[in-house]
Amino acid sequence: MIRSLLIGCGAYLPERILSNAELASKVDTSDEWITKRTGIRQRHVAADGELTSHLALHAAREAIAAAGIDTQEIDLIVLATTTPDDTFPSTATKVQAGLGLGHGAAFDVQAVCAGFIYALAVADNFIRAGQAKTALVIGAETFTRLLDWEDRSTCVLFGDGAGAVVLQAHEGNGSAADYGVLSTHLHSDGRERDILYVDGGPSSTGTTGHVRMAGQEVYKHAVSKLAAVIDEALAANGLSVDDVDWLVPHQANRRIIDGMAKRMDMSSDKVIVSIDRHANTSAASVPLALCEAVRDGRIKSGDLVLVEAIGGGLAWGAGLVRIGLPD
Ligand code: UT7
């Protein structure tokens, strides 16, 4: 059975840091409210002229270097974003050009905060089908460009950043002990569109629009839907929570992350948390957290990692990945 090995990852955050205190000087909020309700202490914000493709390219280059491959080996780029540089062409093709590549396929996927899980699933399925051998999977956002800075219920929650991983085809034996992506599980429910959306778009208003969210509604869906998809991922592989070395959750709210860990009866030191420093970076949230933990040596080759995310759509999903290369 062909498996997609995860052989390298990279992350990038814009230089500028916006603290809760600085935000509180511009909008009616406080460091105390934001920290207590979300766990966020600061977020990174892209500079004027710094685009999603620029963040993505930094992360991609680091992932390629970590994988130790020749860039020319890449024959697929799947980039998850809600904030493409332009309406078209895809941001993935801009990254492709930035890497000096003129072969293979490059395209974007749009599943908002679940975007990286969707992109991972798409690339994994291309590799399993034999249609690609070496894929770059990226989650990249300049999400702060979608914020209404007068809406305190949303503008305090999000940040900018990018994360990337390299997947490579490898012959596995089909068991849950295999390295690479063991499985991915995707869901969406378009009936819940109105609880998290952007009030603009090229076809509807001709404007980019701003994020609108019924926070408590999304919160309830997040808790129940993430729990269900985690159970689904473990059951599909005949695994239990004890087999999982690390949970790398979507970083939307510290209370959701802690609730998920508690429900799984998972010790908090097995959960990767970056929301305090990154806030919610939408499609970049999971790969940013994952790559930070790989960089600092917490996540090692051979570790089994459970990733999950939910966002607008609603769209949500989970995946199980054994990191690195088999001996
Ligand atoms: O990534 C996509 C997935 N997104 C999520 O998973 C987000 C899920 N939702 C959440 O994380 C939480 O619902 C929020 C963090 C968005 C909000 O927290 P909450 O505990 O649900 O607060 P709330 O919306 O119920 O608001 C409580 C109070 C309200 O005031 P009143 O009506 O009680 O007087 C709000 O007006 O807090 C007020 N409030 C604020 N106060 C200070 C809302 N935003 C702020 C703010 N600063 N920034």
Image: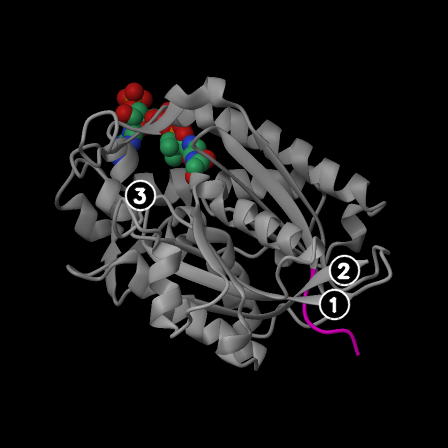
Instruction: Report helix, strand or loop for mark 1.
Output: strand
Asked if 202 appears above or below 159 in the picture, the reply is above
- As drawn, 82 above or below 292: above
Q: Count neighbours of disc 1 (C-alpha within 10 A) and say few if under 14, some if 14 to 19, many if 20 or more.
A: some
| Res 147 → quadrant | top left
Foreground disc of the pair 1, 3: 1
State left or right for residue 23 relative to residue 196. left
Q: Is mark 1 within 8 Å of ligand 1?
A: no
Query: How crowded is the residue under tag 3: few (<14 C-alpha within 10 Å), some, or many (20+)?
Result: some
Q: Decide: marks 1, 3 in contact (CB < 8 A)?
A: no
> Disc 3 vs disc 2: Cβ atoms closer than 8 Å?
no
> Which coloring applies here?
one colour
Q: Position of residue 318 (x, y in %)?
A: 63, 43
Q: Reading the chain from its start, which is encountered first: label 3 or label 2?
A: 2
- In the picture of the structure, the residue carrying the numbered disc 3 is 32
Q: Which residues are magenta?
A: 322-327
**Label 2 sits on residue:** 2
Give the residue at mark 1.
170
Q: Main structural element of the magenta stretch: helix, strand or loop?
A: loop
Q: Indicate left or right for 71 with 302 as reference.
A: left
Amino acid type for the residue under numbered disc 2: Ile
270 or 208: nearer the eye? 208
Of 314 and 68, the residue lying toward us: 68
Q: Residue at x 53, y 26 (%)?
A: 221
Quarter of image, res 161:
bottom left
